[in-house]
Image: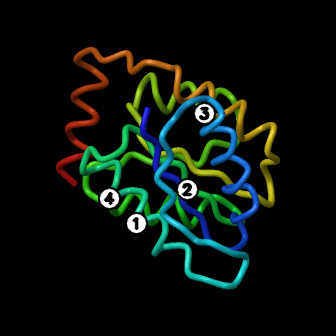
Amino acid sequence: MIISIGSDHRGFELKKRLKEYLEKKNNKVLDCGTDSDASVDYPDFAKKVGESVASGESKYGIAVCGSGIGVSIAANKVKGIRAVNATNENMAVMSRKHNDANVICFGSDFVDFETAVKYWDIFSTTDFEGGERHCRRIDKINKI
């Protein structure tokens, strides 16, 4: 699987560890930056992750900042992206089952590495339920 990952400076360490984890699981990881803990602006990296997923270059994206909120907002501005700031297991499940989310976001101030891996594994292995109800709602989102 091809996965895009990006973060700002506050999410850099978590991003680096997640990238290593994903590569050990034989995924191809497209690193959208940043490359250090020097201060940068999170929208730049969330946009790159979102564009990679929206274009089909990667199947899923992971975006990390301090809270997970900023990268989620920014990624959702990219047409075709449905990003979720997963703060518990159920959100990781439901974002895929009902919303066909394609980018998962983490707040490094709130989610440690082990928890992020758990949520990622749930997110990436949960299938979209489909069905008329969920597809109709996603279609409405796409038209906004």
On screen, residue 127 above or below 108: above
Q: Do the residues labelled 1 and 4 touch (CB within 8 Å)?
A: yes
* Dot placed on the residue nearer the N-terminal end, 4 or 3: 4
Q: Do the residues labelled 3 and 2 touch (CB within 8 Å)?
A: no
In the structure shown, which secondary structural element does the residue marked by tag 3 occupy?
A: helix
Residue depicted at x 40% and y 66%: 47
The residue under label 3 is which amino acid type? Met
Mark sitting on residue 91: 3
**Left or right of 136: which side holds 43?**
right
Q: Mark 2 points at which residue?
A: 63
Q: Distance between the residues labelled 2 and 4?
A: 12 Å
In the structure shown, which secondary structural element does the residue marked by tag 1 occupy?
A: helix
Q: How far apart are marks 1 and 3 (CA)?
A: 22 Å
* Dot placed on the residue nearer the N-terminal end, 2 or 1: 1
**Left or right of 143: which side holds 23?**
right
Quadrant of residue 58 within the rendered picture: top left
Residue depicted at x 73% and y 50%: 17
The residue under label 2 is which amino acid type? Ala
Q: Mark 4 points at which residue?
A: 51
